[in-house]
Amino acid sequence: MAAGLSIMQEAYQSNIITALKSDILRMEGLRPATSPIDLGLGPICEFFPNGSFPLGAVHEFMSPVPEDNASTCGFISGILSSLMGDNGTALWISSSRRIFPPALRAFGVQPDRIVFVDINKEKDVMWVMDEALKCGALTAVVGEMREISFTESRRLQLAVEQSQVTGFIIRHNARVNTTACVSRWRITPLPSELSDDLPGVGFPQWRVELLRMRNGRSGAWDLKWINGRFVPGNNSSRSAALSNTLNYEGQHEKKKAG
Amino acid sequence: MQGRFVSIWFHHLTTDWFSIRQPHLSQLPFVLKASSHGQMVITAANTLAEREGIGRGMVLADAKAIVPDLQVLDDIPDLPEKLLTRLALWCIRFSPFVAIDPPEGLFLDVSGCTHLWGGDLAYLADIEKKLNLRGYEVRVAIADTLGVAWGMARYGKQPLAVPPGDHFEAMLPLPPEALRLEPETVERLNKLGLRQISQFIRMPRTTLRRRFGPHCIMRMDMALGQEIEILAPVVPPEPYQDRLPCLEPIITAIGIEIALRQLLETLCIRLQQEQKGLRAAIFKCYRVDGKIESITIGTHRPSFSVAHLFKLFEIKLSTIEPALGIELFVLEAPQVEEYLPEQKKMWEAGGGLEDIQLSELVDRLTGKLGNEAIHRFIPEEHHWPERSYSPTATLHEEPTTAWPLDKPRPLHLLPKPERIEVTTPIPDYPPMLFRHKGKLHMILKADGPERIEQEWWLQQGQHRDYYRVEDEDGNRYWLFRLGHYDDKVFKWFLHGYFA
């Protein structure tokens, strides 16, 4: 009898804790998605708050070299394809655009549903980003820039909390500074794999590192993009290897600086 | 085609205008005066005053002797021209070609217009009725030539519609004044007892020229349709325009903002009532020193939203230099399109590219960054990578063909292919190594070649053989060789990065 009561009590307490946790998330501007969109990120989802990719937030991607940049854009396009669905639109802001629109189709994005904003002056990128993130008609905004200060990132975060637009920032420099972005990622290309030792280049494969996730956990995975969806790579259990994100970040910094 | 012309004669143009503005005047004899050579002279008299024998050119004191309780008002200089221009613009409803004929007439080129009213008579009656309703007394005549229409309107007998081809006969009983001759010529004709056109129209031209001058011959030819008379039509102003004059010159930014908002509000209400939206607008500020400052905005969809349009102007408002002050604000909408409420509803709820919020955002970005900053792309049926897509100016243009998926294309394409040094083992094989910007890449995996030929009808040049390669770090590149391997003059390039 007493044991039954304690089980009930425990269940009751864990309910309270779950409710409180989601309250905290809401207070921090992170609303639980009303109808979570499955981005097909598989094992990565466990590392997100509430178990789903945070929408209505700004995500930061570090990609200082052109090769990483292409992979980063590929990963973001893969996410965009699920986010945008059939009717979504996105804005792609850049002062040095290299995206080849027809290639977006291979990542499930209709290139004609993206409006590209090509800017001459780097400093206008932030203004456009801010304006665009306030526009509720958009599904997502991707901005390529070099620098973002904490204040600027805070402003973007406030804008998306209102409009629930999802923002992606691709940073072309390696300088790591504190930002108000909900997460920080780094995507690097990995050698593609073809079965049975077939010659040629296989499906894109990346190392996806989640360096920082507010209210979530960091981790690293291998991910492939096959026929319009993410597929965990052969080495998908690498999350354990990245026990200390900050440590990794620091090492990475030193490597770049050197 | 035979031309047809209408002449409208406003025989009490200025006095009618005063009566319209001050209705009690229409019951009283009144005149307009102006000072001339030190005395007050009557410049216009209304019907009641004329009935008492008062006419133009009479000295005011004489007129007052005839009618002691005569109402006298100050004439306004160049009022007739202003009135005629306004009336001419109004008359564009009858014919697209209206010219003013100072001091008290209008000309309309009505070739091919009258049948829409059911014939000449009905047409003239309609013009007369509508102008009477406005408060103007008019005589309206129609003929094959401007000269005869003019003469009939002023001196002809009813009916004032001259059937096509009858203008010569219609002209005969009119007095010489009907030919628009100079007063001295008319006087000379009268002195000779020539009081009807029929009495001298058949005289030898040389005689007429010698006695009455070439002007007389020219006017006769104009009436007969042998000389072409050129009219300058009034140009309608922007139909969607609003003005805001200021009592005191405006210098402050807040003042300019208030003026802009006020103008936008009136214009937008009008647009909304007419179910239209503007696509372009100009805000002009007339400065005290005579300069005009103006800013222009454009929208991607018709809009009558004050808030949105104000935001667009706001971006550029700081470029206005008020200097000593702005005395007049004008807002014009040169480009206006149909904008039905159903359309609005559709765009508001549509989401995606049709969403009005998106077009408003794009308007703002265009306003700040210029038109060339915003791009949206649609596929083109070309294999040459640079030509495989093209920019479209609109947000709603649908692709005419599908985006191709069959060939691997790099996610990042360099705007200009970059030269690389390569080592290739055998002809038409992918390279083993390549060096780009000093860095050596060892190629482990490769696909290709994919040959893309130049489209000779667009551009001459060598074909490209593309290879998709992957180096030892897993980076994927798109390389190509320009030209044949055998030619010995081929070059290698890096053209893009695969994800």
Image: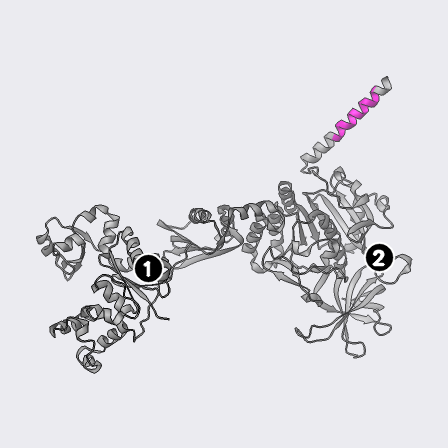
Q: In this view, does B53 lie above or below B225?
A: above
* Whole-percent x, y for residue B46 in the image: 18, 54
Stretch of the chain drawn in magenta = A5-18
> Can you say whether B294 is above or below B27 in the image?
below
Q: What amino acid is labelled 2 in the image?
A: Ser
**A15 falls in the magenta region:** yes
Q: Name the residue under label 2.
A: A192
Residue at the image position 87 percent from the left and 49 percent from the top: A235
- Where the C terminus of chain B falls, by quadrant? bottom right
Q: Which residue is drawn at 54% across and 53% down?
A: B301
Residue B481 in the image, given as x and y percentages of width and height = 77, 72
Q: Mark 2 lies on which chain?
A: A
Circles 1 and 2, Cβ within 8 Å, touching? The answer is no
**Quadrant in the picture for the N terminus of chain B:** bottom left
> Residue extending furthest right?
A196
Dot 1, crowdedness within 10 Å: few (<14), some or many (≥20)? Answer: many
Q: How is the image coloured?
A: one colour
Spot occupied by residue A38 in the image (x, y as percentages of width and height): 75, 43
Q: Of helix, strand and loop, which one carries label 1?
A: helix
Which residue lies most toward the left here? B65
**Which residue is found at the position 71% from the left and 48% from the top?**
A60
Residue identifier under label 1 = B88
Q: Is residue A176 visible?
A: no
